[in-house]
Amino acid sequence: MSIITNIDDLKKIYRRRVPKMFFDYAESGSWTEQTFRENVSDFAELRLRQRVAVDMSERQTRGQMIGQTFAMPVALAPVGLTGLQSADGEIKAARAAEQFGVPYTLSTMSICSIEDVSAKTEKPFWFQLYVMKDEDYMSRLMARAKEAKCSALVITLDLQVLGQRHKDIKNGLSAPPKLTPKTLLNLSTKWGWGMEMLRTKRKNFGNVVGHAKGVSDTTSLSSWTAEQFDPKLDWDKIKALRKKWDGKVILKGILDVEDARLALNVGADAIIVSNHGGRQLDGAQSSIRALPSIVDAVGDKIEVHMDGGIRSGQDVLKALALGAKGTYIGRSYIYGLGAMGQKGVRLSLDIIQKELETTMALCGHRSLDQLSRDTLRIPANFSGDWT
């Protein structure tokens, strides 16, 4: 195996090892994928300000998110179907995050259930909630997260309706995968992945099957999820959900200053500037471009986090310098998981931390709290208003 030095190296291994439908699920966006691409490319518009002859000793990357101190202010974002990228993938990712010292966020649409992850970890993790029409199921889902001692509830706001993702439709994405001739042909080349999946019982949506009424297998699951995302979600419903949860609440999916201001009224502890990884509204602004104006509008009133397009420690530093108090990686750790399992997730975090620490030093800083917009060279109108 070649030496792995960056996230892209993990991506190349991941692509070779994991079936096409699951690679495409992670590595794609909606419609033309413009926002998906710009989430990554817009980071390159920001230049770093190099400083020299500055004491760079005793560097550290520790940071706080929602009052908790972590090895670095980088959380593993919620990613659906993680347990089909690698057998028991959610457990592997949560363990790697726990070992490293950063938060792990479990998706509602995970393969391993809340209880599965809780039983295999020692520290509290975060739980991401999709708002659905079935209020009884929602209440029981939140109660299960409380029972598992999840330390934060991450409510996703930008999935009232599902953005069209062409690759998922063409691949016939399902959990577990449907055994069509096309699928079987691809699976026949992924022996390592296949042998791991044969050894686990977890191949379905663990938080849904057996818990939601009328859902006992994947035949009914796909139609249930399509029907259950709540198109009537509004700020009153979000406020009601916040009252039901007695811990920290983070709102994910804010991309507009007006929505950020409205979020102040529901009692959340933090918001995440995010466009769902470019998987919902194609043509929307990239997360990194949306970040500065949102920080300027509400940053002294609520903690602002950022998700979308982070593929390096330099990207993390740029987001923090623009005012984010925390960042999230999704695809970057999924590449590691699909490539090498739990070890690969840990390696992805090691890579990002090393890049973050080195970049911070070469910009003349020893800790992340010294970062500011002066650390960057920001082009005119980087986050300017559109007409």
Image: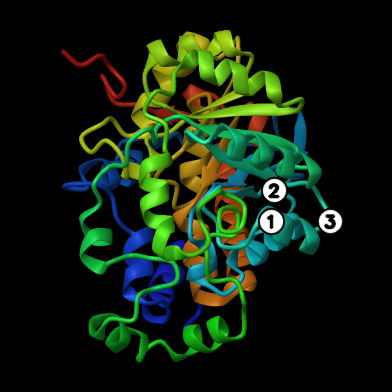
**Pointer 3 residue:** 122
Disc 3 from disc 2: Cα separation: 13 Å
Which mark sits nearer the N-terminus, 1 or 2? Answer: 1
Tell me the amino acid under the disc marked 1: Ala
Give the x, y percent position of residue 50. Answer: 47, 38
Q: Front-most of 290 and 77?
A: 77
**Image quarter of the C terminus:** top left
Q: Determine crowd level at label 2: few under 14, some 14-19, many 20+ residues with C-alpha closer than 10 A.
A: many
Q: Which residue is drawn at 25% across and 52% down?
A: 165
Q: Determine crowd level at label 3: few under 14, some 14-19, many 20+ residues with C-alpha closer than 10 A.
A: few
**Pointer 1 residue:** 97
Quarter residue 146 falls in: top right
Q: Kindly tell me whether residue 221 is visible in this rendering.
A: yes
Q: Front-most of 255 and 247?
A: 247
- Disc 3 secondary structure class: loop
Compared with 109, 198 (above or below) is below
Q: Is residue 209 left or right of residue 17?
A: right
- Disc 2 secondary structure class: loop
Furthest residue toward right: 122
Give the x, y percent position of residue 292. Answer: 42, 21
Q: Kindly tell me whether residue 364 is visible in this rendering.
A: no
Q: Which residue is drawn at 59% across and 40% down?
A: 137
Quarter residue 382 falls in: top left
Which mark sits nearer the N-terminus, 1 or 3? Answer: 1
Q: Do the residues labelled 1 and 2 touch (CB within 8 Å)?
A: yes
**Pointer 2 residue:** 102
The colouring scheme, among rainbow, by chain, secondary structure or one colour, is: rainbow
Tell me the amino acid under the disc marked 2: Val
Q: Is residue 337 left or right of residue 276?
A: right
- Mark nearer the viewer, 3 or 2: 3
